[in-house]
Structures are given as C-alpha cells and as structure tokens.
Amino acid sequence: MAYEYSDWTQIRVTVKVTMLDRVVAIMSMIDPNLMIEDMSDFQINNRYGELVDEALLNADKTVSSVSLFLAADANADETIAFIREKLAADAIEATVDVRDVNEESWVNTWKQYYKPLHIGNRTVIVPKWEEYEPEEGEIVVRMDPGMAFGTGSHETTRGIIQMLENCITDGCTVLDVGCGSGILAICAAKYGAGLCRAYDIDPIAVEVAAENAIENGCDIECAESDLLAGVKAEQYDVICANIVADIIIRMAPDVGRFMKDTSTLLASGIITERAEEVTDALEAAGLYIVESIEDNGWCALAVKKLIK
C-alpha cells in the first residue's frame, strides 16, 4: 500500500511501555530526532501552578508512542517497511500509524507537555513562551526546539546536562556534535564557557539552534556538519555528543584528535543494553570512562583520553 504525503509525514509506533526502549533504538536507526509520548511516569504536582490537560489525566499509562517526522521528499513507504521489518524481527507487537502534518501543527501539539524542568543542581530549562521567576543561583535556559531534538525532558539530555554542569570552567572551549535545538551548547555558554560551536547534519536544527542561542543572549557558532566531517580542526576542552549508540561508535576513532590531553567527551543517547558496546569502541580509540549516569534505561558517559 502506498501513502500520499504532504509537507511532513509522521510515522508513529505505539507499543507496551516495556518495549519502548527497543522501539526507540529501532527508529533511531532512521532518525535520532524522535518524539516520545510516555505517560507511564507522568505525575501531577503544582510546582509550577500549571493546569493539566484532561487528556493527560486519562491517558493509557501502559503504552507509549514513538514518532519520527519525514520531509516530503523522503521515501516514507520504504521507511515504514523498514520499521515493520525490524519490529517483526524483534517480535514486538505494535501499532504503526501514518499521518500528514505541517510544521505549525507539529510544533504546537507538543507544547502542552513542555513545562519548566529542573536539571542538575542549578539548571532550569524553561519554554520560551512560559513565564518563570528564577530563584537565587539558578541558571535559566529558554528553549523553543521547534522541529529540532532537545527540550531537556528526555533522559539522554538530562544526564548529559548534569555532567556538563561539572565540566565547564570559565572560558573553556566547547563543541556540540549533533546539536539539535542547541540546548547543550547554550547550557555550556550559560555556565561560563568561552568559544562554543554547535553542529548538526540537519539544516533545520542548525537554524533552530542559532535562534535559541540568540534568545538566550549566547554567542554560539552554529553550522552544518555530518558528525565531525565539517568541524573546524581544533581541540576543545569539552565535546558533547547526545546522539545514539551507533553514531557514537562511528565517530569514536576520530574524536580524539579534537581533544586535548585534559579534555572531556560527554556521550549520551545510549540505551543501557548497548553501553558496553559503546565503551568498547571508545576504549579501542584510546579513551576511557570516568563517569556513567543511568536513567530509566538510558546511559550518559563522561570520557577522557588515555595518556601513555
């Protein structure tokens, strides 16, 4: 069966909560910029005085959904067939829905779920359209991720931000590979970093990251690059890579030349089951793990060079 598509095509896979990580891993093979709907750990509180949509209160908390969005010129039929094949190979029972969306409706749909988030010891990620009065010592990062990945709500982003808080020193240089919304580079700049560069293969992500940097008053160089291919050949004090396991493994042999002897690589987007595989690839490239954070099936790593 062939589908007719408009500006964007949403492919949405719904499964039991226990299968969520496996489905995320499958769909990340196609695109790491996923929308995840998981109400299983949704809890109501009045910390920010928000109103909670009735649909959230009544949501089925035994299932979760993962969506990716394809542009009009992408081969959606081929992508759907690939997803169904991988689901069948892993014996995952799932519902696959396909619908057309435009950018405006996609952006506005998820805003009801996005509220101020406290991460680490002092970071608060606040949607651009929300009012928030920071407490003393808090660092506020205002975000509008648009069509790019990175609201701060996902475990992969939370883990790397926690590490980033402790890695940044005044005036240090930072490289963000696969920057998405630019959230990590912006956090780094807010923590006191000097030169910050953010790269992504997706031109929309680069545009969004640049806009978010301006919104936060941060001077960040944003540009397109396929991983490290287009990165300026310099050594950075901190490198962030919140991507997926396969991509981190692919970049492992090359990342060392962008690191000083004292540099730290922060790698995230790794499902726990693949952490050992990623660790092996990094160690084979002359790096070693100094810290690991696990959160709900996801792993973030802090990595250093092995100095002989």
Image (tube, grey):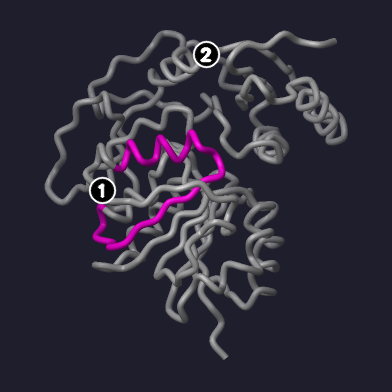
- Three-letter residue code for mark 2: Asn
Q: Is residue 63 magenta?
A: no
Work out whether residue 67 can be spotted: no
Magenta-tinted stretch: 190-213
Residue ID at (47%, 57%): 240
Q: Seen from this angle, which residue lies furthest bottom?
A: 308
Mark 2 surroundings: few (<14), some (14-19) or many (≥20) residues within 10 A: few
Question: Which residue position holds label 1?
Answer: 218
- What residue is rendered at 75% in x and 24% in y? 75
The mark found on residue 284 in the picture is none
Question: Front-most of 109 and 213?
Answer: 213
SS type, badge 1: loop
Q: Relative to residue 57, is residue 208 depicted above or below?
A: below
The residue that disc 2 covers is 102
Q: Position of residue 134 (x, y in %)?
A: 16, 39
Quick check: 123 left or right of 155? left
